[in-house]
Amino acid sequence: MENLYLLMIVALAALAIADLVVGVSNDAVNFLNSAIGSKALSFRTILIIASLGIFIGAVFSSGMMEVARKGIFVPGEFYFDEIMIIFMAVMITDILLLDFFNTIGLPTSTTVSIVFELLGAAVIMTLIKIGHNDAETISAITKYINTEKAVEIIIGILLSVVIAFTVGAVVQYLSRLVFTFHVERKMKYFGAIFGGLALTCISYFILVKGLKGTPFYGDFQSIIESDTWLLIGGSFIFWTVFSQLFMIVFKKNILIIVIAAGTFSLALAFAGNDLVNFIGVPMAAYHSYIDWAGSGVVASEYSMHSLADKVPAEPMLLLIAGGIMVLTLWFSKKARTVSDTEIDLARQGEGHEKFNPNMLSRFLVKSSTQIATYFEYILPKSLQEKIDRRFEKPVVTLPKHKTYELPAFDMIRASINLMVAGILIATATSMKLPLSTTYVTFMVAMGTSLADRAWGRESAVYRVAGVMNVIGGWFFTAFVAFTAAGTLAYLIYIGRGAMIAVLLLLAILLLVRNYISHKNKAKLKLDKSGLKKTESKTVQGIIQESAENISNVVSRTNKIYTDMLRGLAKQDTKKLKKSKKGVNKLNDEVEELRDNIFYFIKNLDETSVRGSNFYIIILGYLTDVAQSLEFISKASYKHVNNNHKALRFNQIKDLQEIDRHLEELLNEIEGIFHKKEFQRIGHVLNKKDEIFTSLSNKIEKQIARTRTEESSPKNTTLYFSLLLETKDLVTALMNLMEEYYTSYKKA
């Protein structure tokens, strides 16, 4: 039996490494995004600063791992074997849960996940213990579990969301009124004061949150706690003078220092305080094993009173943990995915939106718009105009294809994000309020985005939907953490060593699967086979540049259409579903090109208007092609998925004949555009009547069959729909060819 527990310790050590990786991948968003989004520093510099913060925070932490984690359960009421089951269930659940959020690119709280996992596993073990003890009833659960603490944490989630969002919005709004979007101009007058205030907040945060629990904190504790306002006042004077001297001597914006210091402080606090979330449980398990092994008592009878206290972590372990966290920061692709989610939701400009609007987001946006309308009646017109002028953005003449090279937001917003998050977390820490670091930093960023008018009429429903998704994910974290950890604890209790082996194997398989899935998605984003934005402004240039797009669309149309007909003939829902995904991807790409029209036209000169007209017409025909494919794929999938009668042999035969004709046509068109032999388009146009005649004949044949032998209304409807939509598809392609041919001859 002792060997089993030794193997569990080894497994927990491996799980601790994995937990560090997935934990940092998710929490990196807390301290990276303001710097990355503002582009105040190079990405490499940001990582170096954050790495220093993480490493220092990890190595110089007190090394005291609080086992009973926030007092969630009473360890003295559990025996060694029960504790080990709880810890094993918690670690497996934590890794899988955090990795899931990393894969889908949503930030969550590592603290909340570990707390609710401990709570869930402990509750199940408690219920098992009560079930085996006739003297206890369900009411005895309070002897084992601190239920008040769980409620406190839930309240903390709500407080984090509301307080952080509100404070972030108010501070950003006032800051923007002062600085406007012409920051460089205003920094001459207010830069030193703002820099002094921001750096004061950040340094106070470092003292209260970052250094708390370290060996150095005792040297400052009396000053921080007794002379707080004196410390803040002295710090403000020092940093204000520093800011002014920095701007005079180096001729640089003090906001660069603010963002760098803020990034360092949040990284320091993260490593120093959240390290316990990743290695606290394995360390507790290790010390539990040492205590039990030396006791000579049976595992099922050895009470774990020793875990009520904090347990030390060796300096070497902290060094290794810090190193793993730094390496993860540099090499984790999933960290970038999570980070991109927040930056996309917070960015000032327009672009591709990651989230789809829902009923709640539409309701909130509509309600907010109505409230804003009421305020317009209350506020004097002159005041409204004055406020609007403060929010006027400078015009940046940059083509749309370079939009993403621009900062997502300016350095003022980035500084506010870091400053407000820091002071809120520091204040909550000093008042012992259970605010989550992740929740605070994210909601501050969302509040500042709203106040900065980043959520305009064009993007509000998407951004609000995104925020709702993230917040929903937080509550999902708590629920799943509790449920999953409890379930795994029960399974391990029943199956012991064999079940642990199965669960570890399952965990490895799921992690590998998520890794492959994320890797494939990343490849898809970088896929060069998709449709490309046109940069040319002349008709001749657009003809040449867009030829690749046309060849791409025609090639994919050919494959999708053939696959759909084969799937329909074989009643193969998998093939039809795959075709639907292909159509959706094509639709999204065409839609993205259409979204680019505004920026394309805005950057045209007077001599290029005819080019824009040609470009718009071409996109219109590509849209028609995509829509025809979408209709065919949906109708086919719906028919087969609803288990309707298969198409008759004659119908399949006729469709295959059409497919052959269409395949020949599309192959020829693809070759023309691939080789840019536009003079051959005339030959394709001559085949227009031939294919239309073929389609009309098939329609007439089906009419005759319907009158005499057809017995399935669903079949008839589907067949006519396919023929008519194929006709529309060919029409769109031929119109496209004609437009190209005409413009090519004129150019």
Image: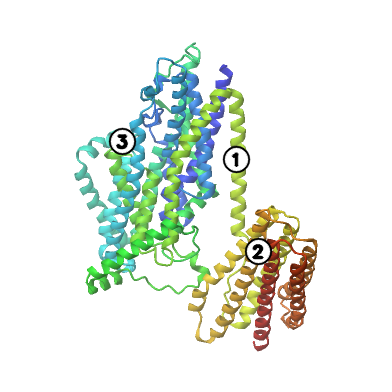
Task: Examine the image and state in which quarter residue 217 appears.
Answer: top left
**Sequence-wise, which precedes: disc 2 or disc 3?**
3
As drawn, 630 above or below 150: below
Task: Indicate which label's residue lies in the foreground, 1 or 3.
Answer: 1
Name of the residue lying farthest toward the bottom: 746
Q: Which mark is residue 217?
A: 3
Where's residue 297, x and y in %? 48, 11
As drawn, 101 above or below 378: above
Location of the N terminus by quadrant is: top right
Residue type at tag 3: Tyr
What secondary structure is found at the residue carrying circle 2? Answer: loop
Q: Is residue 519 left or right of residue 719?
A: left
Q: Nearer the viewer, residue 320 or 684?
A: 684
Rounded to the nearest angstrom, the CA distance separating label 1 from label 3 is: 42 Å
Q: Residue at x 43, y 48 (%)?
A: 472
Task: Indicate which label's residue lies in the foreground, 2 or 1.
Answer: 1
Q: Nearer the viewer, residue 276 or 245?
A: 276
What residue is shown with label 2?
529
Task: Examine the image and state in which quarter residue 711 appears.
Answer: bottom right
Q: Which mark is residue 154?
A: none
Where's residue 139, x and y in %? 37, 23
Q: Is residue 506 left or right of residue 388?
A: right
What secondary structure is found at the residue carrying circle 3? Answer: helix
**Sequence-wise, which precedes: disc 2 or disc 1?**
1
Location of the C terminus by quadrant is: bottom right
Q: Is residue 392 left or right of residue 734?
A: left
